[in-house]
Image (cartoon, rainbow, N blue to C red):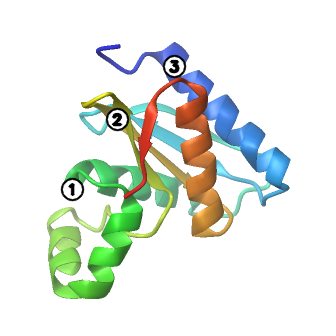
Amino acid sequence: MAELTLDTARKILDAAFAKATELKLKPLVVTILDPRGVIKLAAAQDGTSLMRAEIAHGKAYGALALGMGSRALYQRAQEQAFFIDAVNTMARGALVPVPGGVLIMDDFTLLGAVGVSGDTSDNDEACAVAGIEAAGLKANAG
């Protein structure tokens, strides 16, 4: 697979929501970006709270911007807060450096990123990973 198709993005989205249902999570927003950072697909379950779409986008965007899953960004923010703050300033506040932003990989090719928001960061990440893996791709959560 050389690119992230809409069909593949739908598989990721459906599987991420299925995982959320299985785990009985709070309503989620899932945003899938292509490797340029352009939205390929985004959807919100009924009942999501305000700002969830922006947070999901920020998790995926941050993963793409720095080439690592947002769990690694979270760790980096703990160790080098000034660096993450500076990068986020350059990105006009678009990064959300907490787990839930996962890179989509096909072997060694970056296809995009998934951002999930609505429950705990760990649960958000689990849904993103489940979606990516259900589509037959590799997840890099950081």
Q: Residue furthest front?
A: 107
Amino acid tagged 2: Gly
Q: Quadrant of the N terminus?
A: top left
Q: Cβ–Cβ below 8 Å for labels 1 and 2? A: no
Question: Mark 2: which secondary structure?
Answer: strand
Residue at the image point whose x is 25% and y is 86% from the top: 79
Q: Nearer the viewer, residue 123 or 37?
A: 123
State if disc 3 and disc 2 touch (CB < 8 Å).
Answer: no
Residue named by callout 2: 112
Amino acid type, residue under disc 1 in the picture: Leu
Q: Which mark is residue 66?
A: 1
Mark 1, Cα crowd under 10 Å, few <14 / some 14-19 / many 20+, is some
Is 101 positioned to the left or the right of 62 in the image?
A: right
> Residue at position x 32%, y 68% from top?
73
Say whether disc 1 or disc 2 marks the residue closer to the N-terminus. Answer: 1
Neighbourhood count class around disc 2 (C-alpha, 10 Å): few under 14, some 14–19, many 20 upward: many
The alpha-carbon separation of the residues under discs 1 and 3 comes to 23 Å
Q: Quadrant of residue 11?
A: top right
Residue in the foreground of this view, choosing between 22 and 56? 22
Residue placed most toward the observer, 63 or 54: 63
Res. 42 visible in picture: no
Question: Residue 89: horizontal and vertical position, in percent?
Answer: 19, 72
Residue 84 visible in this rendered orientation of the protein: yes
Q: Is residue 63 left or right of residue 30?
A: left
On the image, the x and y values in percent for residue 13 come to 61, 33
Q: Say which amino acid is labelled 3.
A: Thr
Which corner quadrant of the image does residue 47 belong to? bottom right
Q: Are marks 1 and 3 in contact (CB under 8 Å)?
A: no
Please indicate whether residue 121 sits to the left or right of residue 33 in the image.
right
